[in-house]
């Protein structure tokens, strides 16, 4: 490589940086003024750094075979600002690629007007300013609770939801509030909180990126008067797992200021177990208590759905290689569950999973067709589900992988299914991935009707993102996603 080529490469990179830097305020303006949430191939770009934006553009090469140009997306952003758009989600990456693929002679302005015709001149300043977001309360502040809090705070500007309070057990520690704030600020797996966090002792609150979150100390759900804190018609997200049936969770509904309850664990009895993207439309107005099922159920159900719709599933087995969780012991000690008393960081622990059976609650057509097991392994996050299936229709590796790639990019389950073709991918590469499952296409095995798929999933971040999507559904907040189809 000669010196001239090296100089040209650096100049090209600097030009990309300059363009990406100029895009950041445009992305912010669309978000704060119009509630337009922008993304690139499903990856939100609000509050991203210059390098983060360039990495998002580079990612497109994995799925489309060529890198996305910042010049193309920048041009789209400038035009979007002049269109007076209604609140929505817009994937500027997919718009740019779709425009480039056109054979007809159509300029970019006319293309965008055609694609976004339903949104143009749909912005109403009065409605935007007066529309009150739904109050959200986190009951419990563990791993899932804190990640859900991060997502809610990140989306405060245009999500239609507002995190108002967290409820934790009473504590005698004088610095309890500071410790809660510290756990939100720092995370050994997911890194530091993106923003600023302050402790407001006088108001018993944590202020995160300007959002004041009341910390309420209570043991019993029904003892709390949320209206005393200005909280009304709230959705309670119960992260404790203490109550999983109708009677137990109904205690939340006895508290003043509560409208609905979402459980972040598999529900028992007649509680609807919902996997967002698959059966969330089954939630009815009168359903005041619903469950977000488990992280594994959310990981496997979307992939199983698209496979069953396309090929048919006759039978199968799900093996989950799952990171250890807080309910296991650090060193050997008593545990009510079989094997879980043994040291989590030192052992692979054979366990059970109800995910294979639970799939039938979201996909009744698969009832009785799947079995499942789990192995807890000494990693703190990111798990894998191995689907060993017998399909009704025959296929081959290339056809199946292409089908799953299309589902990850363009289907109604694009927010749930991700796709990688990297032969070097390992679990830590997917920390923070908010899709429920990432298809590892290099590991796919097909033998006529027999298929083995390997699905990575961040059992914390991916599940927490599904919880927030489900809360949007329960609150009646629906953003249109463009381009369509």
Image (spheres, grey):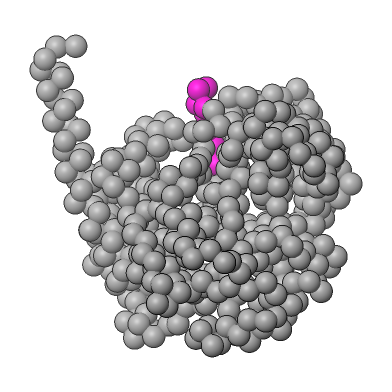
Q: Is residue 256 above or below residue 412?
A: below
Looking at this view, is 230 or 121 the one in front?
230
Task: Identify the residue at image location x=62%, y=24%.
Answer: 443
Coordinates of residue 61 in the picture (x, y in percent): 40, 33
Bounds of the magenta segment: 417-425
Q: Is residue 234 above or below residue 295?
A: below
Coordinates of residue 166 in the picture (x, y in percent): 54, 69
Task: Identify the residue at image location x=20%, y=33%.
Answer: 13
Give residue 1's quadrant in the image: top left
Coordinates of residue 253 in the picture (x, y in percent): 70, 81
Task: Identify the residue at image location x=67%, y=61%.
Answer: 240
Give residue 101's quadrant in the image: top left
Is residue 81 rendered magenta in the image? no
Task: Identify the residue at image location x=31%, y=45%.
Answer: 53
Labels in figure, total: 0
- Using the rendered image of the protein, determine whether residue 362 is visible from the camera's viewpoint: yes
Q: Is residue 356 above or below residue 234?
A: above
Left or right for 373, reference 24? right
Coordinates of residue 435 in the picture (x, y in percent): 55, 47
Looking at this view, is 255 or 114 the one in front?
255
Looking at this view, is 161 or 13 the one in front?
161
Looking at this view, is 359 or 133 the one in front?
133
Left or right for 247, reference 106? right
- Using the rendered image of the protein, determine whether residue 318 is visible from the camera's viewpoint: no
Q: Is residue 231 above or below residue 66?
A: below
């Amino acid at each position: 490589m000669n010196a001239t080529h090296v100089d040209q490469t650096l100049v090209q990179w600097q030009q990309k940086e300059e363009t990406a830097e100029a895009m950041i305020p445009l992305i912010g303006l669309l978000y704060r003024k119009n509630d337009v949430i922008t993304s690139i191939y499903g990856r939100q770009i609000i509050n991203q750094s210059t390098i983060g934006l360039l990495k998002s553009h580079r990612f497109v090469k994995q799925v489309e075979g060529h890198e996305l140009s910042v010049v193309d997306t920048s041009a789209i952003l400038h035009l979007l600002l002049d269109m007076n758009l209604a609140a929505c989600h817009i994937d500027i990456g997919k718009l740019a690629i779709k425009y480039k693929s056109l054979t007809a002679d159509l300029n970019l302005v006319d293309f965008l007007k055609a694609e976004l015709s339903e949104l143009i001149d749909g912005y109403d300043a009065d409605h935007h300013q007066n529309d009150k977001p739904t109050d959200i309360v986190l009951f419990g502040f563990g791993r899932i609770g804190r990640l859900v809090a991060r997502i809610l705070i990140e989306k405060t500007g245009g999500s239609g939801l507002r995190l108002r309070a967290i409820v934790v057990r009473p504590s005698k520690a004088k610095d309890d509030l500071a410790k809660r704030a510290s756990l939100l600020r720092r995370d050994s797996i997911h890194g530091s909180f993106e923003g600023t966090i302050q402790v407001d002792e006088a108001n018993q609150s944590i202020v995160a990126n300007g959002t004041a979150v009341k910390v309420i100390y209570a043991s019993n759900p029904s003892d709390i008067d949320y209206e005393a804190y200005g909280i009304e018609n709230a959705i309670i997200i119960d992260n404790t797992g203490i109550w999983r049936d109708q009677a137990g969770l109904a205690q939340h509904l006895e508290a003043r200021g509560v409208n609905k309850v979402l459980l972040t664990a598999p529900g028992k009895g007649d509680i609807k177990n919902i996997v967002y993207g698959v059966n969330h439309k089954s939630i009815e107005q009168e359903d005041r208590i619903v469950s977000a099922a488990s992280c594994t159920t959310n990981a496997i159900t979307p992939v199983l759905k698209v496979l069953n719709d396309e090929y048919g599933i006759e039978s199968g087995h799900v093996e989950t290689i799952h990171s250890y969780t807080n309910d296991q012991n650090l060193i050997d000690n008593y545990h009510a569950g079989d094997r879980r008393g043994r040291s989590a960081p030192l052992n692979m622990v054979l366990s059970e999973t109800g995910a294979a059976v639970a799939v039938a609650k979201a996909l009744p057509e698969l009832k009785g067709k799947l079995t499942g097991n789990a192995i807890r392994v000494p990693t703190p996050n990111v798990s894998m589900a191995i689907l060993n299936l017998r399909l009704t229709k025959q296929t081959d590796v290339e056809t199946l992988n292409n089908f799953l790639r299309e589902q990850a990019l363009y289907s109604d389950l694009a927010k749930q299914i991700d796709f990688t073709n990297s032969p070097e991918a390992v679990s830590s590469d997917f920390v923070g991935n908010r899709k429920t499952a990432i298809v590892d296409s290099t590991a796919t095995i097909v033998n006529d009707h027999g298929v083995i798929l390997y699905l990575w999933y961040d059992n914390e971040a991916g599940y927490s993102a599904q919880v927030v999507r489900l809360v949007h559904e329960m609150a009646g907040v629906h953003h249109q996603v463009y381009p369509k189809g």
